Amino acid sequence: MRLVTHGDSAPASVSRYLLPTEQQHLMVRRHPAVLLRPVAEVFAGLIVAGLLSKFFGDNQGGGTALVVVWWLWLLLLIRFVWKVAEWSVDYFVVTSKRMLLTTGLITRKVAMMPLGKVTDMSFQRTLLGRMLGYGEFILESAGQDQALSTVEYIPYPETLYLEVCQMLFPSKDDSDD
């Protein structure tokens, strides 16, 4: 699975938010670890449904309860499929002029911060993030709160941090090109 694209054309769900004068520098999909909780919920629900099936299957008249248990598990499974679909359309994009975070399947949200407004950027990684390879970007700007202040579940955070910092704070050698 390719999570990082450099200069490739953005999917239509992202390119419609790019200005004609912007150049896409990098685009990443959020790390699949964002799906850990829904996966755990589906598996835990399956275990509980299996145990309850054993319990209700042994009792007379447990057929209705058994149907309810499996319908509840099916709802968990549908929720998981929905989370995967949402994850598949969520992107963090850095262009020549701004940073965007596009999220949402039905209600589309686009959070944006101009590169010129970013005064500080850092990232943090939890223990689980270090083990699985994701982190969180924290963006700061002068003035009021911005629509884009944190970006969670960023894959390859050290590499992307350095690439974004290179764009935010170019060296004199880079600006001469």
Image (tube, helix red, strand yellow):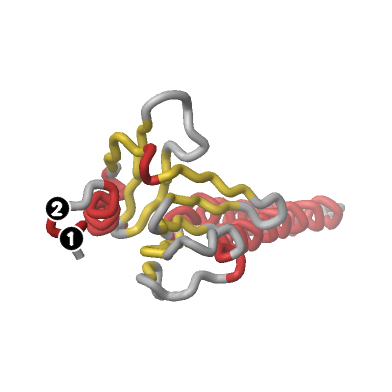
Q: Is residue 112 left or right of residue 173?
A: right
Q: Nearer the viewer, residue 177 or 31?
A: 177
Q: Is residue 114 left or right of residue 108?
A: left
The residue sitting at 45% across, 43% down in the picture is 113
Residue 62 spot, x, y in % from top left: 82, 53
Residue contact between numbered discs 2 and 1, judged by CB atoms under 8 Å: yes
Q: Secondary structure at mark 2?
A: helix
| Residue type at tag 1 | Asp
Q: Give the quadrant of the C terminus.
A: bottom left
The residue sitting at 21% across, 52% down in the picture is 170
For disc 1, the marked residue is 176
Residue 176 spot, x, y in % from top left: 18, 60
Q: Is residue 146 visible?
A: yes
Give the image quarter of residue 1.
bottom left
Residue 93 spot, x, y in % from top left: 44, 58
Q: Is residue 131 visible?
A: no
| Residue type at tag 2 | Lys
Q: Nearer the viewer, residue 110 or 166?
A: 166
Q: Secondary structure at mark 1?
A: loop
For disc 2, the marked residue is 172
The residue sitting at 37% across, 64% down in the picture is 25
Residue 76 spot, x, y in % from top left: 67, 54
The vertical placement of 103 against 11, above or below, is above
Give the image quarter of residue 87.
bottom right
Q: Nearer the viewer, residue 151 or 58?
A: 151
